[in-house]
Image (cartoon, grey):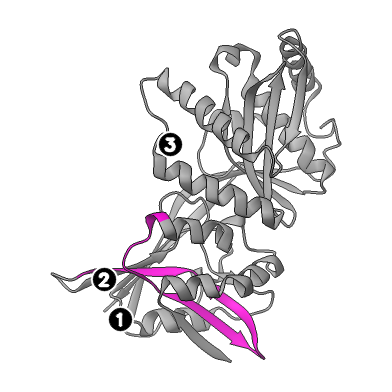
Amino acid sequence: MSVDLITSAEALEAVAPEWDALWRRSTAATPFQSPHWCLPWWKRFGSDDPFAIAVRSNGGLDCFAPLYILRDEDSDESLGMFLGTGVTDYLDAVVAPGADAAPLVEAMTAADCQMWDLQQMRPGSPLLSAALPDSWSENVEDQDACPVLPIENAGEELQNLLSTHARKKLRYFRRGLEREGEVRYEAATIENLDAFLLALFDLHGLRWQRRGLPGVLADDVIREFHHDVARRMLDAGALRMYAMRIGDRIAAVFYGFAHHDTVYYYLSGYDPDLEKLSLGNVIVAHAIEEAVRGGARTFDFLRGAEEYKYSWGAEDRVNRRRQLFRS
């Protein structure tokens, strides 16, 4: 076994093919641990130097922790975190099935870093239970809830998932939208991706502007980040992005990702003028139906306790935070 430290942006890019292969093997990983998310994040939001840890055995990558360390030169204080901290719903290392994550924690605690703040890890993360040296202490606490919906055997029309009343309401709203014009759904392709993203930014912004707020997609750097992520995820086969057209115009966009048997709902945008026809729920229903047709077993609504998520029957899975302190 060998443990390699990756401490430059160039080296981080160079390890991307191995990293991607490991991510594809790992059923416990999410799209947010892939290079398709982390590298665009580092390019736009990273600072100081990366401190990624690669654990290999028999020449293959077994574990990869995408980390970086912030340093305050005036006080000699240092803080280590995951790439993606802040805008990412799940943070973690990527660990191959059956691999041991202990070398990752050993490398972290051996580094020149006073504290590691490992946020938004799912409850089953091996980094939550890996042992610490005697010279280190820890704090572990709950963080955000992510409502998760099982969709295995839901039926292509969600007949085994939704109550009769809920399905009637969905049909009612769909008929209402059809009275506005011909309704068509399109999946993202390389040809229409830019148009879908522009529509997502505009529609998401419109809803927030009516509340007097800019919305999370208003910043140009955030938009560049998602342009890069969406293209990379599309190339990797992990993008799940759908547009609903009413007539010739895009009225709603679903923006999410997939990995193994789970679809992740990241953001959506829809025409606020059609809010009374529950346009947001209709585009989510389409995404869930597509997930079922694609063989997914879980639909993850990600962070946030919005009421509509629970109306689908989703139940909370609570992320955990582990802070490691050098004594």
Of labels 2 and 3, the one closer to you: 3
Q: Position of residue 60 (x, y in %)?
A: 66, 84
Observer-nearest residue: 247 or 296?
247
The vertical placement of 108 against 264, above or below, is below
Q: Which mark is residue 301?
A: none
Residue at 60% from the left image edge and 13% from the top image edge? 274
According to the image, label 3 marks what residue? Answer: 216
Judge whether 321 appears above or below 270 on screen.
below
Closer mark to the observer between disc 3 and disc 1: 3
- Provide the major secondary structure of the magenta segment: strand
Indicate the quadrant where residue 256 lies: top right
Q: Looking at the image, which residue is at 84% across and 30% down? A: 157
Pointers 2 and 1 in contact (CB under 8 A)?
yes
Q: Quadrant of residue 71?
A: bottom left
Q: CA distance from mark 2 to mark 1?
A: 8 Å
Q: Which residues are magenta?
A: 44-72
Q: Nearer the viewer, residue 180 or 100?
A: 180
* Residue closest to the eye, 104 or 165: 104
Residue at 44% x, 62% y is 83
Q: Which mark is residue 112?
A: 1
**The image quarter in which residue 281 lies:** top right
Question: Is the C-beta separation of discs 2 and 3 under 8 Å?
Answer: no
Alpha carbon distance from label 2 to label 3: 29 Å
Numbered disc 3: secondary structure:
loop
Quarter of the image containing the N terminus? bottom right
Secondary structure under tag 1 reads: loop
- Give the distance between the C-alpha atoms of the residues marked 3 and 1, in whole angstroms: 34 Å
Mark 2 sits on what residue? 78
**In screen coordinates, is 156 left or right of 74?**
right
Q: Quadrant of the C terminus?
A: bottom left
